[in-house]
Each structure stands twice: as C-alpha cells, then as structure tokens.
Image (spheres, rainbow, N blue to C red):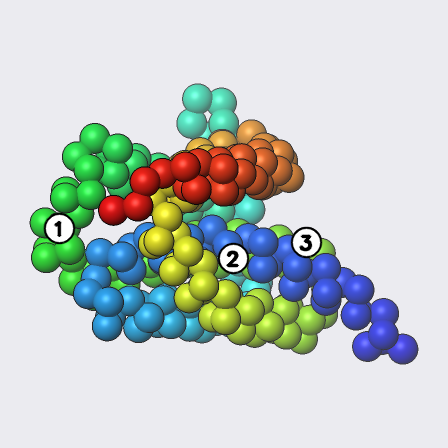
Amino acid sequence: MEFTDNIVPLLTLIVLETILGIDNIIFISILADKLPPEQRDRLRYWGIGLSMVMRLGLLALIAWIMQLDQTLFVLAGIAITGKGLILLVGGLFLIYKSTKEIYHKAELGDDANAPDTTKATFRDLLIQVLILDLVFSIDSIITAVGMVNQLWVMYTAVVVTVVIMLVASKPIASFISRHPSFKILALCFLLIIGMSLVAEGLHVEIPKGYIYFSMAFAFLVDVIQMKTVRPNQPHN
C-alpha cells in the first residue's frame, strides 16, 4: 500500500525535476558548441552523468542539506542562508555567462565564436558545468525533500530524470545549434533563471510557472516566425 501511495508523488517529482533539468540541458548544450563536434556529446554525457552522481551524493547527505536553510549572517536586513549563498553565487555566474554569450552572438556576430572555440577546453567547460550542476542539484534536492519523505522516491526520481535528460540532450542541443535565433532565446531563458536564482537567494520568490510560461510563449512566437519567414527567404 505504501508503494502505491508514493506513485503520485514520484511521478510529480519526476515531472518537476525534468522541467528543472531543462535549464541544465540548455546551459550544457550552449557550452558544448564551443568544442569540436567530436567532443560535444562527451561534454553533454559527462555533465548530465556527473549531475546524477552529485544529486545522489547530496541525497546521502540529506541532514547537511537541510541545515543549509539555517541563517549564516544578516546583510542589509536580509537573512543569508547556506542555500541562499549558493543560489546567489550560481545565479550571478549564470547571469554573467548568459550576458557574455548574448553579447558575443548579438554584437560580435558568429565569427566571434571562432576564437572562443580555440581557447575553450573540455576541462574548463566541464568545470563550468559542474558549478551550475551543484547549484541546480542543491535546489532540486531541497525541492524534493519538501515534496516527499521517502528516500527511495527521491533516488528513483533522480535516476529517471537523468535518463530522460540524457535522451533529450542531443535533440535539444542539435535544435539550438541549427537555429541561432533559438540560441539567443535559450540564453535569455538562462538569464532569467539566473535572476530568479539571485532573487530566491534573497528570499524573493518568483513563481517558476510565470518564467516557464513566458519562455514557452516566446518559443511559440519564434517557431511561428520561423515557419512564416523561412519560405519567403531566397535560397543561397
């Protein structure tokens, strides 16, 4: 009976974790474009695989994770917790990376990516992925703890979510790579996520539903524009 009672929370948690995992996939996909084609899949698989290891490890340290909600210090009347500090750092990092990529795409043009490709190394990009993995993982685990009490449900949800992310990562990455306008849209999405992480770290709650709905609407508009404009463009 206990197993049956946990089915709905398990499915709900898997859906929620998958939605949250889209941020991770987009970030990894954009970074992977800086590598030679033969290394891109490797970065995606390593990044997503290590995120699973990180989340499973954090679940084993569940007592420590729960202590992250305790106040570390007060800044300008705002209580800063361990979780808040991690979200602040991760959010600022995401804002910096997204803004930098948007600038390169919008101001310097596609040719500006060539120097970055030669400088970017697999190790450096993997470190950047791990930084965001840590932020998203802690946020994900705290969300999971707030939803369910059974550890096996959390472990199952993490494993299933990572499998879904591994399957979805290549199609999403290929789509973003083929359509520059969607890459800008994805970067704007990451910028908004970064801002929401900073806000959450400062105890200002921005409902995730608003963020995902606005981005889904922008995505739909971009799809309609792509379908209507492309047929009228002359072929090279």
Label 2, on which residue?
21
Q: Secondary structure at mark 1?
A: helix
Q: In the image, what residue occupies the spot 23% across and 72% down?
A: 38
Q: Earlier in the sequence, mark 3 or mark 2?
A: 2
The answer to whether one can see residue 207 in this image is yes
CB under 8 Å between callouts 2 and 1? no
Tag 3: Cα neighbours inside 10 Å, few (<14), some, or many (≥20)?
few
- Left or right: residue 95 compared with residue 57: left
Instruction: Say which residue label 3 marks.
Output: 146
Residue linked to disc 1: 114
Residue 134 shown left or right of residue 71 in the figure:
left
Disc 3 residue type (three-letter) = Gly
Quarter of the rendering containing residue 229:
top left
- Alpha carbon separation for disc pair 2 and 1: 29 Å
Foreground: 222 or 229? 229
Near mark 2 (Cα within 10 A), the count class, few <14, some 14-19 or many ≥20, is many
Quadrant placement of the N terminus: bottom right
Residue 156 image offset from top left, x and y in percent: 63, 74
Mark closest to the chain's N terminus, 2 or 1 = 2
Q: Residue 184: horizontal and vertical position, in percent?
A: 36, 39
Sequence order check: which comes first, mark 1 or mark 3? 1
Q: Amino acid at mark 2?
A: Gly
Outermost residue to the right = 1
Q: Please determine whether, in this image, residue 77 is positioned above or below residue 34.
A: above
Of badges 1 and 3, the one in the foreground is 1
Q: How many marks?
A: 3
Q: Amino acid at mark 1?
A: Ala
